[in-house]
Amino acid sequence: FQQEWVSVPSLGFRNYLNQELALQLGTDREKAQADGISANIQMVFPGALRWLILDADRAGQGSGQSAAEQIVDPWRAERLVWTLLEVLSGSSSGLDERLTNLNSAVSLAGRALPISLLFDRYMVHRPQMILSWIDHKDFGPDGSDLPEAQLWQPSLFRAVHARITAQYTNIATPSERLEGALSRVSSGDVKLGEQGKKSLPGRIFVFGQSVISADLGPLLTAVSKHHKVTALLLSPSA
């Protein structure tokens, strides 16, 4: 049986939904007895849909591998942190010296991890800013020049970008790839239901979102062209 695919906004919502489903699914209604089991349901955060689309698109761009078989995307936060460590522990030429001047209370790994999570959030919520940094334009989210105190961010990002593009062929940032990937999903050129273990089922559910954010909306629009999308929102105006 194919797993159900449900997007949830938080761990708390995931636990709540699992418990409620266990009280309803597979129960003996005549005896009013709940089995207490909720199974074969994949509950993920909304970002998982974004990566599923990007991985499927990369698999369809000539790699010859399914999304489940190819290497983990080096731009995922859990991989990005290792590239950041390599950059920070290598030559610091061109980088803000504050990044590598550590005291006894701070390790290099402890510094790299939050920066990798920050860059990951930028690629989701501030893609145009990331694209400007790649183009050597140090703009902020509003399109104006970054203040001097924040210029370490685009400088460090470009160093990470250069290292990843040197190590991996044809793996641009998610900010550069997502628009084209969504277009190919919408047209049917990329089929999310044919990616092996990472396939998307014929129907998906979005549960508990307070709003459909600017980054989630285009994902659901593209997927809805070929999959049934049901949104169970906290407010009908979300």
Image (cartoon, rainbow, N blue to C red):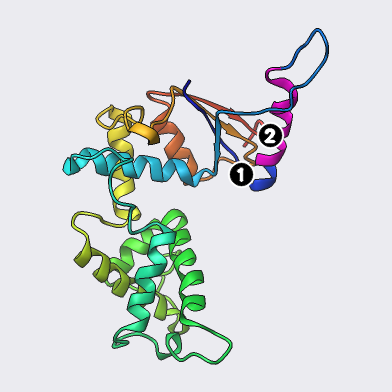
Residue that badge 2 annotates: 17
- Image-based side of 116 in relation to 168, left or right: right
Which residue shows up at 68% across the image and 17% down it? Answer: 26
Give the class, few, some or many, for how many residues have Cα within 10 Å of label 1's Cα (few <14, many ≥20). some
Residue 98's place in the image compared with 109, above or below, is: below
Q: Position of residue 165 (x, y in %)?
A: 22, 64
Q: Nearer the viewer, residue 86 or 179?
A: 86
Mark 2 crowdedness (10 Å alpha carbons): few <14, some 14-19, many ≥20: some
Disc 1 or disc 2, which is closer to the eye? 2
Res 7 seen here:
yes
Quarter of the image holding residue 85? bottom left
Is 16 covered by the magenta stretch? yes
Q: Which mark is residue 225?
A: none
Q: Secondary structure at mark 2?
A: helix
Q: Main secondary structure of the magenta part?
A: helix
- Give me the residue at 28% from left, 32% from top: 190
- Start-end of magenta stretch: 14-26
- Does 31 appear above or below 16? above
Callout 1, which amino acid? Pro
Q: Secondary structure at mark 1?
A: loop
Q: Nearer the viewer, residue 194 or 218?
A: 194
Residue that carries the numbered disc 1 in the rendered image: 9
Q: Real-space Cα distance between discs 1 and 2? A: 11 Å
Quarter of the picture containing the C terminus is: top right
Q: Amino acid at mark 2?
A: Leu
Q: Earlier in the sequence, mark 1 or mark 2?
A: 1
Q: Residue at x 38, y 31 (%)?
A: 199
Residue 135 visible in the picture: no
